Amino acid sequence: MRSIIVILVSLLLTGCAGNPLKPSSVSFTSAEMQTALDKKFPIDKKYLGIFDLTISHPSVQPRPADKRIAVQFDAQVYTLGYNAILNSTVSLTTNLAYDASKRSIVLKDPRLEKISFTGLSSAQAEGLNQIAALLVREQLDGAAVYNFKPEQLRLLGMNITPERIEITNTGVTVHIQQ
């Protein structure tokens, strides 16, 4: 019995790649990402003191074939804080990355894919597309969609480092360095 304990302790202390107690991955679902993003919305921005932009109702969808996450949300433009003059739907895709300082999986390099406006000329829509793309990068790049608990990144005194992020049909699997 004592020799088994000595062997197990030796493996733990050397950080052996074959450590059976160290998890090989952590997974979280699309619903968990959705919950994290819901906490960041709605986003309200003012432009030139005339227009107010509100972005709300994010919807997360994994795209494993593209190795990206798709996010769609509603956008409304108000004049002087009153009636909505414009309603639209904005779609973007984003990569995921591990941010060690936040101990989180974050959105990385969000890219505006599509924005739908009704009742606008193409020139007006293009101008709003540029504003929306800027707002998307400004507000969502680096936004956390999963926060690791401290105990998830330490096991028996060993630091565990996320190594690779895999987007699956049901969510995300973060593979841990062995």
Image (tube, helix red, strand yellow):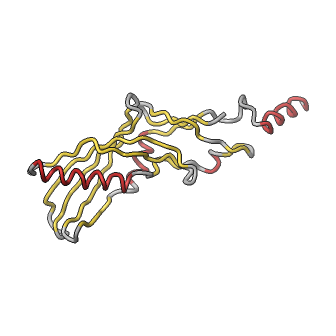
Residue at screen point 47% across, 47% down: 106
Residue at screen point 43% across, 50% down: 36
| Residue 32 x %, y % | 45, 44
On-image quarter of the N terminus: top right
| Residue 65 x %, y % | 38, 28
Residue at screen point 37% across, 56% down: 139
Instruction: Locate residue 44: give its quadrant.
Output: bottom left
Count of marks, rendered view: 0
Residue at screen point 54% across, 37% down: 174
Instruction: Locate residue 178: give its quadrant.
Output: top right
Residue sitting nearer the eye, 166 or 28: 166
Q: Establish if 45 lies above or below 19.
A: below
| Residue 24 x %, y % | 62, 33
Residue sitting nearer the eye, 128 or 117: 128
| Residue 102 x %, y % | 55, 53
Q: Is residue 57 left or right of residue 7?
A: left
Q: Establish if 154 lies above or below 85.
A: above
Q: Is residue 126 left or right of residue 141?
A: left
Q: Is residue 149 left or right of residue 86?
A: right
Residue sitting nearer the eye, 103 or 42: 103
